Amino acid sequence: MATTFRGWKKVAIISLFVLPTLISVFLISLYPILYNVFISFTNRNRFHYNPPTEGIFACTTEAQGTYCWQSPILKNYTDLFGPLVTPESLLSWLKIVILIAPLVITYLLIERVRKSNLSPPDTWWWWLVGMGGSVGIWYVLNLSNAIDQLMNTGDFFIVMFRTVLYVMACMPFFILTGGILALILNNDAIKGKGIFRTILILPWAVPNYITAKIWEFFFRDESGTINQLLSVFGIEGPAWLQQDLLAFVAVVIINIWLSYPFFMTIILGALQAIPRDQYEAADVDGATWWQKLTQITIPLLRPAVMPAIVLSSITTFQMFNTVWLVTQGGPIRGAGKPGATEFVMLYAYKAFRTDRYGATGAFAVVVFLLLFAATLVSMRMTQITKGAYE
Amino acid sequence: MSKPSKLATIILYATIIIAVLIAIYPVWFMALASVRPGQRLLALDLVSMFFPQDITWENFQRLLFEEDFIIWLKNSFYVASLTTVLCVSLATTGAFAFSRFQFKGREALLILFLAINAFPGVLALVPITQILRSIGLFGSHLGLIFAYSAGTLVFTTWNLKGYFDTIPVDLEEAAMIDGAGPIQAFVQIALPLARPALAVTALFGFLAGWNEYIMAQVMLPGKEELHTLPVGLVSLAGDRTVPWGLFAAGALMISIPTLIVFLSAQTYLESGLTMGGVKG
């Protein structure tokens, strides 16, 4: 189509189509982001809120009520990162890298063996060796000390660390519950799949601010439904949302309930795409149910599930509504310290609410860069997996 | 596949029935609370935690005739639909161009769109509230529409581009051989073909605004007559003394239509999950 037009005519026609969209995207979507980058270099906050009358470039004093360039200009960023690049912190980082190394090496070795051998040997026990190595390193290098040291460097690491922990705690359960339910729904012995499937998707379909409030009620200490149920069995339920670990567990449980339908749907779709004759051939060879699952089903699910994991990690990483409406980031120990469930978005929101605009801006830029990188990874994966299916 | 044994079948059914119960219980709980007399979510005994006892429609009545529920409903509908109309109409031509034309900077622009899409709404609160304050739109529905459009516009463009990619170009080429210009090809061939895609994209844009909570909470402070549904409903569930039955009744009335819409559009959602198929 593009070949039909040349020169100015082509430019004119393309502009006619592209410009309305482009101009509005620049004004409505891009401008706020650029403005945010600008704010991140200023000292704008509760005490410096007005634009300087003499212009931001001439503004050098910290006059009351006017905001200026932050001095030094990267101060908002160094406040976030500064304590994380001291020699002491760098040593802790190095220890963390060494901790992960055995797992990465195991993964790379397994991939190599897989690619070079026509019939790859059992490699699951390699993971045990790798994990054993990591556990050993944990004790030898005293990793809990290293993490404590980084935790003491300030909010940024604490918030990031907890958010990543949250994502890592959720993901296996998402895959497991979604996978098990998809496998059952894909089984010929089950009747009424349509109805089951529709009901199982409910948690995804109901607006999440509503379900968040209901779950918040479930987890209340005395009147909460979960503790009421426990008391029937003579168990006195804990005050879920008042204890750090339990509050964390509670938001993980809620997120599993919210997110398994997504994985169930994706995995079910992928299961239905697996050709039947693969299983028939395996049956002829006398394969057990477990062998079929691990040798046929799981390898064939990988291309569909991997992008879903990345996508869902991104969503979980920036989860706001549910956690906010259930715990408000709490329980909070001490003023000015992030609460046990104060994940990235909640932290940003609280900083915004306390009018720390410059600092929030810098935090937003950093988080955005991370999210964009993750998005690019997920795109690459989708493209690779598309190749795998074609 | 070989048939599982009887015992295995029973285990499969048991698992799925337990899962179904867990999936449905919070919604069922909401339904129970909405018809329970006495304005509380708390059930006194085990039976009433699972089965309705004295049914009252008082909550629904109060919500519809005494509270601002209908106003919230109108506000939400207004904000969400205006955002959708704005975004879809601004995005369609651009999405078509990105799908059909090759031009300088196309790839770069697509990456830029992707980057903008990665910027989460909560992080955009700082710049957007500042901008809205300086142009005097803070605290108005128009301001909220602007805030929603910041995210929805880019999403809509990406999504529609993905759908245009799936429509074969042959028809348009045939039309152009017959002497149609690109504008004619777009209006008379591509747009009618893309109608279902437009509808679905619009639907998701609408649902995003319809279910959005925190921006509406921040951007419309203190003005109850401007509240959207999520903000209004959550305010009903605010603390321990508030009328929970009202919240449950409102939540139920909102959930059911949202649910039906979501479930009927769900097959389209799946295909759009990867943001409308990302071919470079």
Image (cartoon, coloured by chain):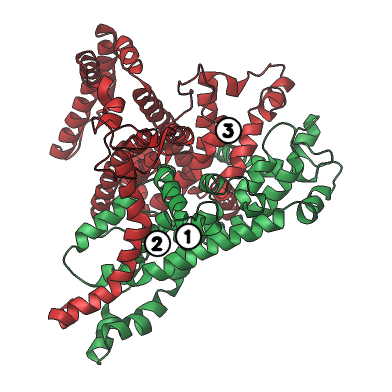
Chain colours: A red, B green
- Left/right placement of residue A119 relative to residue A53 reads left
Q: Against A108, is A191 above or below?
A: below
Disc 1 packing (10 Å; few <14; some 14–19; many ≥20)? many
Q: Residue B147: x and y, percent? A: 45, 54
CA gap, disc 1 to disc 3? 26 Å
Amino acid type for the residue under numbered disc 2: Thr
Residue under circle 2?
B156
- Left/right placement of residue A94 relative to residue A291 reads left
**Tag 2 and tag 1 share a subunit:** yes
Q: Residue A88: x and y, percent? A: 22, 13
Can you tell which mark lies on residue B205?
A: 1
Callouts 2 and 1 close, C-beta under 8 Å: yes
Amino acid type for the residue under numbered disc 3: Val
Disc 3 packing (10 Å; few <14; some 14–19; many ≥20)? many
- Left/right placement of residue A48 relative to residue B74 reads left
Amino acid type for the residue under numbered disc 1: Gly
Helix, strand or loop status at disc 3: helix
Residue under circle 3?
A326
